[in-house]
Amino acid sequence: MNENIQVREQKPHGTTFGWAKAFAIVAVFAILTSAGLSWYFFSRLAPGAVTFSTLSEETTKGQFVSYISSMQGQNNLQVATLRTQEEFGITSEKKLFRYMPGGVVEVAARVPCEITYSVQLKDSEWAFHIRDNGRRLIIVAPCIEFNKPAIDLARYELRVVKDSMIRDSEEVKIALQNQIPGLLDEVARKNIDSIRDTARISIKDFIEQWLLNSFGDKQIMTPVVDRVYFADEEHLFKSRLFGDKSEPGAGL
C-alpha cells in the first residue's frame, strides 16, 4: 500500500512541471514572433507611410528669394567685424628755388577703427547646389563687401614727429588726414581674406536658420550646409561642383 501512495503523489508533481515548461516555451515563442513581425512591419511598411520629399536647387533658390523679399529693411548680411589700430605717416620736404632746402616735416597718425564686412542679400546672385540626394547643400554667396571704416575719434591721434622752423606743419597734417580714408579702404580690402572663415560660419548659421524657418514644419528633408564659397573663389568651387576632383581644404 505504501508503494501505491508513493505513485499517486509523484504523478501530479510530474504533470505540473510539464505544463509550466510548455507555457514558458510558448511565451518565448510568442515574444520572438511578435518582435519579428514588428521589425518586418516597421522596416517594410513604415518608410512608405511617411514620405519626405527633397529640395531641388530651383526650389531652394526660389524660396530663398521669397524669404529675403519678405525681410524688411535688410539689404545685406553682416558676416564679420574687424577692429584694428593702424599707424600712418607722411614726410614732406620742400625746396626753395628748386635747390635750397625748405624744411622737412614729418607727421604721424594713430587710427583705431572698426570695419564691418557683409554680403548682399537683395539684388545679388546666390547659388544653391543640392548634393547627396538632398542631404548636403553647397552655397556660393556673393563677394564680401565692406562698409566705410568707422574711426574711433576718442582714441584718434595726429602728431608732428618732426617739425621745421621754416615750414607750417598744419598743411602736412591736413594732407595726411585727407589720405586716411583711402588708406583705411586699402586696409579693409587687404583683410578680406583674414575674415573669410568667420564669414563662412555666419552665412552657414544664417542659411540653416532660414531652412528651419521655411521648411521646419513641412515634410521636406532639409539638407545640411556642407560648404560655403564666395563668388570670387571659383578656383575653389568650380572643380567640386562641376568636375570630378575636389579642392582640399576649400570652403567650410
Image (spheres, helix red, strand yellow):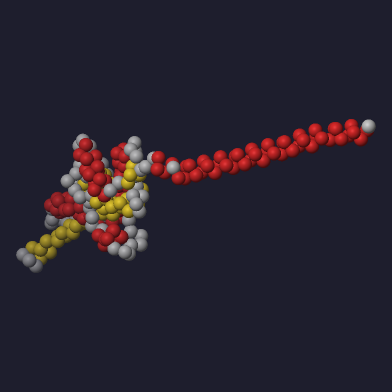
Residue 33 placement, left or right of 174 = right
User: Viewer-proximal residue, 223 or 88?
Assistant: 223
- Can I make out residue 217 in this image? yes
- Quadrant hosting residue 245: bottom left
Q: Residue at position x 22%, y 37% from top?
A: 71
Q: Nearer the viewer, residue 172 or 126?
A: 126
Give coordinates of residue 213: x percent, y percent: 31, 38
Residue located farthest toward the right when viewing the structure as drawn: 1
Quarter that holds the N terminus? top right
Q: Is residue 222 left or right of residue 22?
A: left
Q: Position of residue 66 (x, y in %)?
A: 22, 40
Give the camera-side residue of 134 and 185. 134
Q: Quadrant of residue 208?
A: top left
Q: Is residue 113 visible?
A: no
- Tally the numbered discs: 0
- Name which residue lies at 18% across and 59% down: 91
| Residue at far bottom of view | 99
The percent coordinates of residue 41 (x first, y second) are 48, 42
Residue shown at 31%/64% (left/top)?
244
Is residue 201 or residue 96 the one in the foreground? 201
Q: Residue at x 40, y 40 (%)?
A: 49
What x and y, as percent, mark residue 189? 23, 55
